[in-house]
Image (tube, helix red, strand yellow):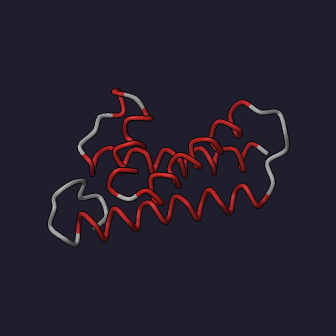
Amino acid sequence: QSTARAIISRSYYAALLCSSRTLGVATSAGHSIVINDLKKRNCRVGNNLHALKMLRQKADYDDNIIVRKDINKALRDSSSILTFLKVSFIRNGDGGFDGFS
């Protein structure tokens, strides 16, 4: 269970921090601000980050068993977010976080 919880948490923070850096929004302003900014640019991707946040909170604070479906969703959502950021910002020359090369 600790490995499953770590996978979900790291998936969320990878997506959050890359979103924050790419969008130029500090996470210190609040995770919700980063999520909302991402939703303005792409609602589906922003909703994926919000869903990933909810999964991370479940993994961190809920005593229920984490199932493979949760892990798969976290990895899928994180991958979707990172791909969106790479395609939308890095390849289009909009600047942002260059950690994708």
- x then y, percent, for residue 15: 45, 51
Judge from the rendering whether residue 10 lies leftward or rightward of residue 42; answer left or right.
Answer: right
Judge from the rendering whether residue 14 lies leftward or rightward of residue 86; answer left or right.
Answer: right
Quadrant in which the C terminus is drawn: bottom left
Q: Quadrant of residue 77?
A: bottom right
What residue lies at 36% left-to-right and 33% top-to-bottom? Answer: 27
Quadrant in which the N terminus is drawn: top right
In the rendered picture of this protein, how many numbered marks are placed on residues? Answer: 0
- x then y, percent, for residue 75: 59, 61
Judge from the rendering whether residue 51 lies leftward or rightward of residue 99; answer left or right.
Answer: right
What residue lies at 58% left-to-right and 65% top-to-bottom? Answer: 76
Q: Is residue 44 above or below residue 31?
A: below
- x then y, percent, for residue 38: 37, 50
Q: Quadrant of residue 45?
A: bottom left
Q: Is residue 40 above or below residue 25?
A: below
What residue lies at 51% left-to-right and 52% top-to-bottom? Answer: 47
Residue sitting nearer the eye, 64 or 33: 33
- x then y, percent, for residue 34: 37, 40
